[in-house]
Image (cartoon, rainbow, N blue to C red):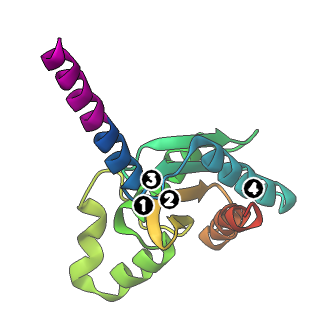
């Protein structure tokens, strides 16, 4: 009976240590679904105020879609372009407009878009950061110019600061 109690005590102590060790681990920033939805909604509302019909996508740091919308009357192609811009900015950790400028100036980097099928070097994609760590990307496609796409994407990111 003593050995059984001793084993039980040992197991109980070990489980307590593992729980404590888990609690001590630093929590990495994470792109939650509610945050992704808030970002998409804010970007969409900005484009709507500006009179643009677009698609907006938010992906996590692995490039997996967390939220995506296509506004009424947005072109079918905007679904893919918004995803690819979000994917590119999350994967390469830079705004897609900056990547497009870099590739245009450096002939060695012009093949960057061939690196992966989902890379798209057009403005409208921005990395999403929490505590300076890239946790995903937002992409907007369908406004009449990539600078307008980027304005809408910036509005999505701004919604993160407003919620704090």
Name the residue beneath numbered marker 1.
Answer: 90
Q: Residue at position x 34%, y 79% from top?
A: 103
Task: Tell which of 73 and 64 is nearer to you.
Answer: 64
Q: Which mark is residue 102?
A: none
Identify the mark at residue 42; answer none if there is no mark.
Answer: 4
Residue at 70% x, 50% y is 38
Whether residue 88 is situated above or below residue 31 in the rendered picture: below
Q: Earlier in the sequence, mark 4 or mark 3?
A: 4
Nearer to us: label 4 or label 3: 4
In the rendered image, which residue does mark 2 sit on? 137
Answer left or right for 54 relative to 62.
right
Q: Which residue is mark 3?
A: 84
* Residue 25 drawn at (x, y percent): 36, 55
Q: Give the CA distance from mark 3 to mark 2.
A: 10 Å
- Disc 3 element: helix
State which tag comes first along the sequence, 1 or 4: 4
Is mark 1 in CB contact (under 8 Å) with mark 2?
yes
Residue 5 is a magenta residue: yes
Disc 3 and disc 1: Cα gap in Å? Answer: 10 Å
Asked if one can make out residue 107 in the rendered structure from this viewpoint, the answer is yes
- How many other residues sit within 10 Å of disc 4, few (<14), some (14-19) or many (≥20)? many
* Magenta region includes residue 141: no
Q: CA distance from mark 1 to mark 4?
A: 19 Å
Label 4 sits on a secondary structure element that is helix
Question: Residue sitting at 83 percent across and 63 percent down?
Answer: 50
Q: Secondary structure at mark 1?
A: helix
Going by the picture, which residue comes out furthest to the left? 3
Give the magenta part as a residue range: 1-15
Q: Report if residue 55 is visible in the image.
A: no
Query: Separation of disc 1 and disc 2 at Cα?
Result: 4 Å
Disc 3 crowd rating (10 Å Cα; few below 14, some 14-19, many 20+) is many
């Amino acid at each position: 009976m003593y050995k059984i109690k001793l084993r039980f005590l040992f197991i109980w102590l070990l489980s307590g240590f593992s729980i404590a060790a888990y609690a001590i681990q630093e929590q990495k920033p994470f792109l939650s679904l509610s945050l992704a939805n808030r970002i998409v909604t804010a970007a969409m509302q900005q484009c709507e105020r500006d009179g643009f019909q677009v698609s907006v996508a938010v992906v996590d740091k692995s490039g997996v879609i967390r939220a995506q919308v296509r506004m009424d009357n947005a072109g079918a192609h905007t679904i893919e372009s918004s995803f690819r811009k979000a994917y590119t900015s999350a994967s390469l950790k830079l705004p897609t407009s900056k990547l497009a400028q870099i590739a245009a100036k450096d002939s060695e980097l012009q093949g960057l878009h061939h690196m992966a099928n989902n890379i798209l070097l057009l403005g409208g994609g921005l990395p999403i950061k929490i505590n300076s760590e890239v946790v995903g990307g937002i992409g907007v496609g369908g406004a009449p110019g990539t600078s307008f796409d980027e304005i809408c994407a910036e509005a999505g990111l701004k919604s993160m600061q407003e919620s704090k």
